[in-house]
Amino acid sequence: MDGGFHHRSSQKQQNKSFKSKHATKGQIKSQNKGKVERTAAHSVKNKTRTRLDRKNQARLIQKNKRDDVLSSNRLFIGSNSTPKILAVVPLCPDTDSDYFAKSLFESMEVEMPDTPGPLNLILERFKQKLQIIRLKRNLLDILDAVKVADYVVFLMSAEVEVDAFGDLCLATIKGMAVPQPVHIVQHIPKVPAKKQEGIRKSLISYMSHHFPGEPKIFTTDTPTEAVNVIRYITSQRPKGIAWRDRQAYMLCDSVDFESGDDDETGTLKITGYVRGSNFSANRLVHLQNFGDFQITKITAATAPGQRDVNMDAESTVLDSPDPINQESLVSENDVDPMEGEQTWPTEEELAEADERVKLLTSEQGQRKKKLVPKGTSAYQAAWIVDKNDEEDDEDDDDQDGSDSNDDDDNIMASDDQWASVKLGNTNEISDDDASEESVEYEEVDVEDKDALLDAEFNEEQENADYLKHLEKQRQSREDLEFPDEVDTPQHIPARVRFQRYRGLKSFRTSPWDPYENLPVDYARIFQFENLRRTKKRVFQLVDSELDGVVVGMYVTVHLANAPRKAIDTYDPARPFVAFTILPHEHKMSILNFLVQRNTENTDAVKSKDPVVIHCGLRRFVVSPIYSSASRNSTNNVQKFERYLQPGSISIGTVFAPIQFGPAPLLMFKYEEGMGQTPDKPPTLLGVGSVVDCDTKRIIAKRIILTGHPFKVNKRSAVIRFMFFNPEDIAWFRPIQLTTKMGRKGHIKESLGTHGHMKCVFDGPLKSHDTVCMYLYKRVFPKWTTRLYIDGTITREQDVKDDEMQI
């Protein structure tokens, strides 16, 4: 055969090919939907770099780090350099910050100036300067000084232990991102030599608990030891703080005021070294206790101890604001009520209006007419029983069901007596009152007995406050043991009591419109389309900004429309600090912050309780609501928490000025007349940080209606005590039921007229199980935000909280 032998094609075995072509399930699903697969573009990052490229990149990183170190060191070195700020914090009652400053001056053989403000120590030997802030045991002053300090000097005693106020100072300073700490022990020579080494080891162990590592303990009792402290400080480079270095700030050495057209406002002049970043005249300046202000101009000033003094340079304008780029003082949006929907007021709004009317009428009706003998005082007349009081007693007796026929006869007799008195007929008065026939009667204005009792309420008020405190503690423990469980009321239908609540198939994935039924306060705030992008753009703008006064210059900043109270209450012995704020940070929005409960405080912290928040450079009074800190929800819905429980981390939400994080946060208990002295320090509730300004974050309050099985028949059961009428059962029938043992079910039908209902579950139900129904309602924070003012600065009564600048 010429041709080669071969089988016919029909006899060849052909295996069936795999249909998916080794594709994944996701790829098959996308193909079925008609999607076209796209090849991933190769980015530059995925390119393999050579060894030479890696060495060049490492060399550039090293060069940038060296340049940063040289620029920061150059800022603090030289005859005209910027001084390093030392905040001297006394932790023990017997420590003295003045003695510490005096020992440093004596070691440099320089006379210590007798001035109350910050002290400038020029170190000719080390070619540097130090600025010492001598602090008293006042927490507000300590926090203000730490915000601008390069080093924190902790003064401890060898004879007295650190007290509760010292522990509070350490906790708050650590929460504010502490600068470089320096530990000083005083009164060590007063201790016997055998015990000195033990005291040093004890103090090292105590400070290492707060600041991990092996801290160094210094003394300043001799000039040599004081020089060692100065050498240690001058050889160190100040540690940068992220939230502070992006903003320009200043420790004011002097403050002056020029009156304007109005005697109450004028131009405030603050003088000091520029720190942080460039001080631009287009930015707003925040002053503690007074708010935000615009800059009119920035002029040069002569620094203390400067050798080359030019008197003409003080009038030189270094920077002036640009009217186009200057930040505005507008913090809220203008609300137009006509832009919203025209709706009728709700029942709650009508009820609140009725309560306000009742309150006004009760205040105006505290005084009433009463017929009394002539010459009777108003206080005596308040305790005379008249007809109206007896009628009130009669009503109370009728409600108790304890009245009798004899009481009715007595009441009618008294009515006849009062009627005869009013008509001037004294012949019908009983024999017992015959001696009072000649008495003349008149009508006088007297205060109500209840008002008199309230005015003299002292010990009973304290007892009531104590009972209220115990009730709050009990509710907190009950919320921790049985979270969100409520009892269905019997006198109000459940469909009316819980009409604002809704059921969710899945709390984590069920959709919820973030713009649904927003309160009017949400029209006053600002929101970002993309907060992360805006934050990145603002930080890039600040880092690349070349305008303004450079860091290290000694300048005078002129603030427009500042209150006269700023200079009237100025105390040179207390630190006076000023911060510039970033763009948009003056506007009001929703601020979400992370907070962890202070374990040393055992008081119950409830949502919407007023607290004082120290957030970055600001401090204000707010009433936050707390929610869970989980991030696994796809619908941005978080669970509302009634109490800030210890051992857990929560998210607080308030109306507050915008704050680009990260920024530290301290939360204190707010009390009227709260002191900052060691005798009455504020109560630290928690420590945290700023999260974001997300206005679409939904906080849902959850309630759980519980019922108990009455009759169980495998998968079906009769449930009672959840509702008490068939109408409520029909209203909540579409909502899913769950049990504490993991069963799921639904309501099938109502049984009888007393709230029994037949339910079907996905498995056999146990008789001791508890049936639950989860209902949710969105809650919003209250607009109670106002600037926190130090107790030494009194406020006028006619100034409203919402009119103050934040």
Image: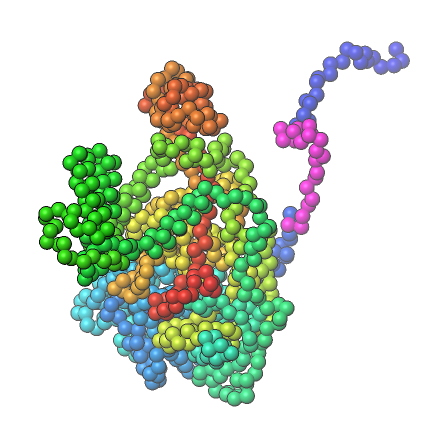
**Looking at the picture, does residue 371 appear above or below residue 768?**
below
Depth check: give the residue in front, 292 or 561. 561
Q: Is residue 656 above or below residue 255?
A: above
Decide whether residue 34 is among the magenta residues: yes
**Quadrant where the N terminus lies?**
top right
Say whether residue 385 is left or right of residue 143: left
159 and 63: which is toward the camera: 159
List x then y, in percent, for residue 307: 48, 87
Above or below, comparing residue 557 to residue 780 in the picture: below
Q: Residue at x 44, y 43 (%)?
A: 348
Q: Residue furthest right?
A: 2
Image position, residue 287 (x, y; %): 45, 69
Which residue shows up at 31% across the image and 71% down it? 136
What is the magenta range?
24-45
Please give left or right for residue 179 compared with residue 26 in the image.
left
x, y (%) of residue 226? 32, 76
